[in-house]
Amino acid sequence: MPFTRMRLSVDDDEELDGQVKLMDVWAVDMRDSKQTSQMIAFIKKADRELESLKHLKRARRSLDPTTNEPKVTVLLAPTTTTLPILPEGTLKPYTVSVPRFGSSTPEQIPLKNAFWPTVYAPSQVTREPEWSKEGVEWVRRGIERVVGEARRAKSLGELPVACYVASPERPEISYLSTDTRISTAHPLRHAVINTIKTIAAALPPSDDPSGPAPTPATPPTAAEDLGPPKPPARNGEAYLLTNLTLFTTHEPCIMCTMALLHSRLKQIFFVYDMPRTGGCGGCAGVVGLRGVNHRFTVWKWTEKLSELDGGDLCVDESVDI
């Protein structure tokens, strides 16, 4: 295919190479298995970074290798934190290596449980889709469109950066914007931000992404074209890019990547990566962070386009796109 999926999270890496990522955790053996629940309650009350251990079972039953007697071991806290003073009579804590992440596939369960029992949570990361010839050509047309628009923007004295939002299921969706920070003398008029503002100006906020299709808007060339600001939407009301695809010439910066994430974008295709400023794998993999509440798929165009000959769309790597 002329594009490849960018893998931005450790979860993806584990699915690819089958290697279990580990971390060190304080643990303690219990003298009496009946005291297990008391120890777990004690640690919860001490609040020793329990969030980072939520993918692990808090206790494990096993055979003591020295006595061959059953024992119960309780996880206390990551070794990066200071242990509280444990109740009198508790055995001496020690460190164990446990999986850093939970099991996201059935195949991972036995691999990770060999170190420590994990919680099974099926991965929400989109599996590699099978692209049809028509789908690939649809992507190609989207890339060619942003490349042509970026060259037009450059001829007008702007940065050669363009974005295009579309959907193969809804061909009436069509939003095209360019970077206008030079003409507007505004440092935040990035192409991605302009695109999102264009859609926000054209769409009534809706909780139902499958609702009536919006009327395509003419891309703005300046801030005043966006019209007066709309009143703030209620929480969860204005997810503007649900099930939509964004094509862009350059990898978005961290600010723009976060804006796409908050807008619930489905996937992004870009041509030029930005290793010093990019938020989709360049200097940061925002989409792959474990704390984010949404993820979208990131694709990089790898096939050479005749429109790119001469490198006339190259931008300094230090520029936030």
Image (cartoon, helix red, strand yellow):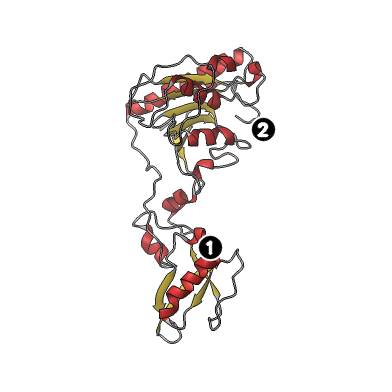
Farthest top residue?
Answer: 156
Of residues 305 and 285, the one nearer the viewer is 285
| Secondary structure category for the residue under label 1 | strand
Q: Residue at x 46, y 83 (%)?
A: 31
Residue drawn at (44%, 29%) of the image: 240
The type of residue carrying mark 1 is Met
For label 1, the residue is 23
**Distance between the alpha carbons at the discs numbered 1 and 2:** 34 Å
First in residue order: circle 1 vs circle 2: 1
Is disc 1 surrounded by few (<14), some (14 to 19) or many (20+) residues within 10 Å? some
In this rendering, would 177 be left or right of 158?
Answer: left
Residue 307 can be seen in this image: no
Amino acid type at mark 2: Ser
Q: Position of residue 238 (x, y in %)?
A: 44, 31
Q: Are marks 1 and 2 in contact (CB under 8 Å)?
A: no
- The answer to whether residue 316 of the structure is visible from this angle is yes
> Picture quarter containing residue 309?
top right
- In the image, residue 129 above or below residue 197: below
Residues packed near mark 2 inside 10 Å, few (<14), some (14 to 19) or many (20 plus)? few
Name the residue rendered at 32%, 31% in the picture: 132
Q: Helix, strand or loop at disc 2?
A: loop
Of 105 and 124, nearer the camera is: 124
Q: Which residue is mark 2?
A: 318
Is 122 placed above or below 45 here?
above
